[in-house]
Image (cartoon, helix red, strand yellow):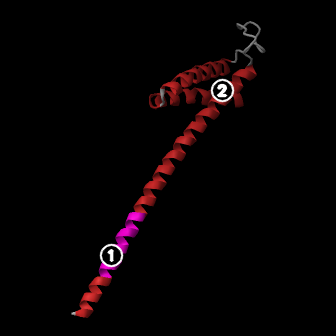
Amino acid sequence: AAFETLGYYAAAGVESADAQIQTVGREELVAHGRLHVDVADAAGALRSGEFPDENEDAPTNPLVTKLQLQLRAVGVLVGAQRAKHGRRLAALRERYVEVCLSLREQDRLLAFSEAAEKIRREREAAA
């Protein structure tokens, strides 16, 4: 059941990766395409349950075992999560910088407000 869930998430990762493919650079696009194919292969194999070490009638590839497919799917999922968290962290950092700049501007305006109030009081006292 755990590996069926893994296959489900691997397939879900493929769909979400398609939406992100337009925002990556050329080199990332090539690497992303390879990952896309790897995840699709791993997810399909996990869903079908056809692995060389379990089903002798299935076409066998001695280089690709169930464990390798599972590890490939896990690796792709980890990479997708890392990229997702990296984007979220970058967005949070950008928002943090915006808030800091806004607070500095507010502090500057408040300083002028306090200075203006002080000048107004001094003028009233002088008059």
Residue 14 lies, with reference to residue 106, above or below; the image says above
- For discs 2 and 1, the disc positioned in front in the rendered view: 1
Quarter the N terminus occupies: top right
Q: Specify whether residue 44 is in view.
A: yes
Which label was assigned to residue 113?
A: 1
- Quick check: 104 left or right of 39? left
For image coordinates 56% across by 41% down, the residue present is: 86
Q: Which residue was labeled with disc 2?
A: 73
Q: Which residue type carries mark 1?
A: Ser
Q: Is residue 110 covered in magenta?
A: yes
Q: Which residue type carries mark 2?
A: Ala
Q: Which type of secondary structure does the marked residue at label 2 adopt? A: helix
For image coordinates 48% across by 29% down, the residue present is: 25
For image coordinates 61% across by 28% down, the residue present is: 10
Residue 97 lies, with reference to residue 72, above or below; the image says below
Count numbered badges in the picture.
Answer: 2
Residue 126 lies, with reference to residue 18, above or below; the image says below
x and y, in percent, of residue 26 in the image: 48, 25
- Disc 2 packing (10 Å; few <14; some 14–19; many ≥20): many
For the record, the magenta segment spans: 104-117
Q: Specify whether residue 1 is in view.
A: no
Q: Is residue 127 covered in magenta?
A: no
Quarter the C terminus occupies: bottom left
The foreground one among 48 and 31 is 31
Between the C-alphas of marks 2 and 1, the distance is 59 Å
x and y, in percent, of residue 113 in the image: 32, 75
Query: What is the residue that sits farthest to the front in this orientation?
Result: 126
Q: How would you classify the magenta stretch by its main secondary structure? A: helix
- Quick check: 105 left or right of 53? left
The foreground one among 59 and 113 is 113
